[in-house]
Image: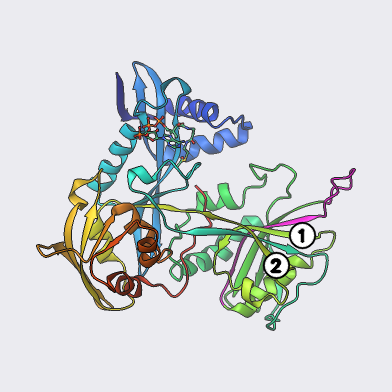
Amino acid sequence: MVDIREVPEADIDRALELAYLVFHDRPEKAARERHHALLLRCDRIGAYDGDVLVGFMAAHDLRLSVPGADLPCPGLTFVCVAPTHRRRGVLTGMMTRMMRRAGEAGRPIAALWASEAAIYGRFGYGGATTGATVEIDSTRPLALRIDPDRRPLRLVDPEDAVDVIGPFHEAARAGRPGRPGRSPERWRDEWLTEQDEEDEELSPPRIIVLGDPGEPIAGYVIYRTKPADDGGAARSPGLVRVDELEADTPAVAAALWECVAALDLTGKVSAWGRPADDPLLHFAADRDQVRVTAQFPALWLRLLDVRAALTARSWAAPVELVLEVHDARLPDNAGRFRLKAGPHGATYGHADGPADLALDVRELAACYLGGTRITELVAAGLVQEHTPGAAAALDDALRTPVLPHTGDEF
Ligand SMILES: CC(=O)SCCNC(=O)CCNC(=O)[C@H](O)C(C)(C)COP(=O)(O)OP(=O)(O)OC[C@H]1O[C@@H](n2cnc3c(N)ncnc32)[C@H](O)[C@@H]1OP(=O)(O)O
């Protein structure tokens, strides 16, 4: 009989051993210490078979930008079940406990990054943001259709970076749904850590900011480099891996991309997890030089309290309709509800009349940040439109000026 309960501090190392076993990992001492410190700050739930920890899950205490608001949002991580106890409902038990606890604590939404896309839909999570991997052939200067901002660029010491770029990042979050806030620890351990956890050949992080001296910065780029590999047939050019690039204007973004593409002794820029509507893809003059090499679901979102989530976000256009929502895990969300929303806010309460749209809570989550259209899901047979035009009307109301984006993998 497996018991689901909180994991005390004393069991954190056991939880990490389980995670390393399950994720086929053998991290160095420094990474283990970072993971330990991270789990100390997380909510932790475990599955115990007698005294043996056979399942584990943690949740960061995050805030997530949603259209017009910033909501508390547990960010699930380190989800693992021992190979001896798979497919017996251990994850289901831990997830049920985690969702109930988060709901009781007044968290309207929860989020995660999935190791495999097939796992979390059954728990009501929908793919809410899309990431794109963008590669630039930088063996030649980056060809641009707009003039880059010519204000000065300067290098910032990683030690000072949180003070310099942290406020810019925090302000930029409000402009794009799907972005978690970053604690100083997350900045230090995830973005600015000297040694990249996944690729030890990469340089420490380099930070370049753009802006006039004494003025607030107008943008920044964080990148790491790897020297050219001249060995044998698998010769590869020096690499610039862009970890983050934020800019106030397209001209600032153009200057920062141009800068990283021009780094000496490198021939390729690779940026993982960029927004699907990255302006670079439009202002690049040669789309053979700037290519999207992969697209993937990034943040998976769960609406734990649909009413609280829908009434917290902003709405781009007026809409009034009845939704029939299915939620197999959290029955308070299930039923028929009238959504009345518009630029001045939203109400959401039980309705008697016939439904205009019927959908699972998972589909609502996929559309909540504006990254997926309801009409696409009608076309895919996943949302039933009982009143013609209802899906398009809801899309107009859910629309965001830019696509949601999540660059923080956790
Ligand atoms: C946010 C993150 O941390 S993502 C990381 C997720 N963790 C991993 O990938 C580590 C390796 N895998 C594992 O530890 C485990 O296999 C887990 C956590 C994915 C699943 O744990 P389990 O206890 O076996 O899941 P559980 O028994 O509750 O399964 C519930 C359902 O999900 C399904 N399921 C579980 N894992 C998967 C999967 N990888 N792909 C597809 N379906 C899955 C089960 O078949 C089951 O379906 P059913 O309800 O129709 O019978």
Q: Residue at image x 30%, y 71%?
A: 394
**Secondary structure of residue under mark 1:** strand
Q: Which residues are magenta?
A: 228-248
Q: Is residue 374 above or below residue 183?
A: below
Image point (39%, 56%), residue name: 63
Q: In x, y percent, where is residue 239?
A: 76, 55
Residue at 68%, 75% in the rendered image: 284
Amino acid at the residue labelled 2: Val
Q: Is residue 10 visible?
A: no
Is residue 136 left or right of 54 when viewed as pictured? Answer: right
Q: Which image quarter: residue 390?
A: bottom left
x%, y% of residue 399? Answer: 38, 72
For the residue pair 218 and 355, the one nearer the viewer reads as 355
The reply, left or right, for residue 120 in relation to residue 192 is left
Amino acid at pointer 1: Lys
Q: Which residue is mark 2?
A: 290
Q: CA distance from mark 2 to mark 1?
A: 10 Å
Q: Is residue 77 visible?
A: yes
Given residues 72 and 326, the one toward you in this image is 326
How many numbered callouts?
2
Q: Dot 1: few (<14), some (14–19), or many (≥20) neighbours within 10 Å?
A: many
Seen in the image, is 288 located left or right of residue 37? right
Residue highlighted by disc 1:
268
